[in-house]
Amino acid sequence: MDNAALVLFRSMTLALLAILSIQPLAAQAQERMRARELGVAPGIFSPGKLNAITDVEGVRVGQVSLREGDTVRTGVTAILPHGENLYRSRVPAALHVGNGFGKFAGSTQLNELGELETPILLTCTLCVWKAADAMAAWMLEQPEMQQVRSINPVVGETNDGGLNDIRARPVTAKAVRDALESARGGAVEEGSVGAGTGTVAFGWKGGIGTSSRVLPASLGGWTVGVLVQTNFGGVLQVAGAPVGRELGRYSFQNAVASSTPVASPRGSGPADDRGDGSVIIVIATNAPIGDRNLARVASRAMMGLGRTGSSASNGSGDYALAFSTAASVRRTFGAPQLTTTELANEEMSAVFQASVDAVEEAVYNSLFMATTVTGNGQTVEAIPLDRVREILAKHGIGPR
């Protein structure tokens, strides 16, 4: 074999080896799937077309993921209830606190007035104020805002300090603006993206998840959509199957095994033995519901969260925000009187059921769609779906 032929042979061999080395990574990415592909479909109502919060007409989601060097793994997720200026055309809203170990900027005014006047941002703990400041600046630049002297940015957080150098406070004004301005309807990216880039749930990689439900026409035909940012612990169960225990990863397992208490700081990742962390749940609906009943909707989110195995530990910030996009309950800024038409109390039960079920599925989607992430000196693995499938099958759960 002459030199030219030898060089060509070596080049082809290296190229083949490179392709073979990439294939397992590609296969790993392709293996991620949503809960329904594993046969997990909580509840009785059908999902919307996308099985996402954006099935609620008008709702848009924008996400920016920040991955810089070996240490930054965080981001921003923006939820916009409609395409108009929210300050001028406000939507009724309410926030429920399951456990208040966290920061939810704008919550007191939101609950006092029962309305949203800005989009909702999700990010990391130490970037809440930077995100709020950036969104306030962005809002003040919008049309018809020249005389505005007060703005109430609504920003929720979870602590991604395990995978992310959270003390660097890496979220920038540009990241916030990009998330707001890129917000669109349609499919929502899930898993290790946006505000879920560096989060951990049940000891596995957590992230962003979404789901929806559409009520039958006889129950109003309303749509309920949910988006979650998962970063909490507990004893994972999926459709009742004890997945966390059978995978050997769950809260308090070290203490149970050794009978010795194990202390861990909030946001410490898989080593956390107490179920600490946080979760933000956003519920959107086109049902005409006022803020009082939206508070009741938001409170039901904790039931869906409980189904997944959370016990809302002492160090967990568990928040649920619900809003309605219905035109009949919109609030025009400056109007001397508001004329609204909303659902009666007796019509709320189906919305409650849809919310509980969609929250549960959104949490599963955040886990099942997440990918393994390394950052800040740690690696948090994606939950192994092949093992999850085996455990589900063992308990009679799977595709039908």
Image: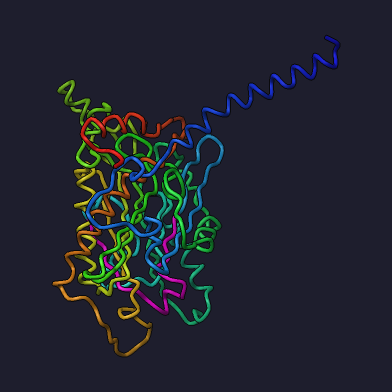
Q: Residue at x 25, y 40 (%)?
A: 238
Where does residue 336 sit, x and y in percent of width and height? 32, 90
Question: Is residue 101 positioned above or below 205 on the image?
Answer: below
On screen, residue 214 versus residue 185, left or right, reads left
| Residue 339, image quadrant | bottom left
- Determine if the magenta segment contains residue 95: yes
Where does residue 161 sit, x and y in percent of width and height? 40, 40
- Determine if the magenta segment contains residue 43: no
Asked which colour scheme the image uses, the reply is rainbow
Q: Residue at x 18, y 68 (%)?
A: 348
Q: Residue at x 26, y 34 (%)?
A: 392
Q: Main secondary structure of the magenta part?
A: strand
Outermost residue toward the bottom in this view:
336
Outermost residue toward the front in this view:
400
| Residue 293, image quadrant | bottom left
On screen, residue 351 versus residue 123, left or right, reads left
Question: Is residue 82 positioned above or below 315 on the image?
Answer: below
For the record, the magenta segment spans 77-97
On screen, residue 81 versus residue 109, left or right, reads right
- Mark yes or no: residue 299 visible: yes
Q: Nearer the viewer, residue 6 or 70?
A: 6
Q: Quadrant of the C terminus?
A: top left
Where does residue 302 sit, x and y in percent of width and height? 21, 53
Where does residue 146 sit, x and y in percent of width and height? 51, 80
Q: Residue at x 28, y 53 (%)?
A: 359
Q: Nearer the viewer, residue 129 or 353?
A: 353
- Mark yes or no: residue 109 visible: no
Q: Nearer the viewer, residue 65 or 209?
A: 209
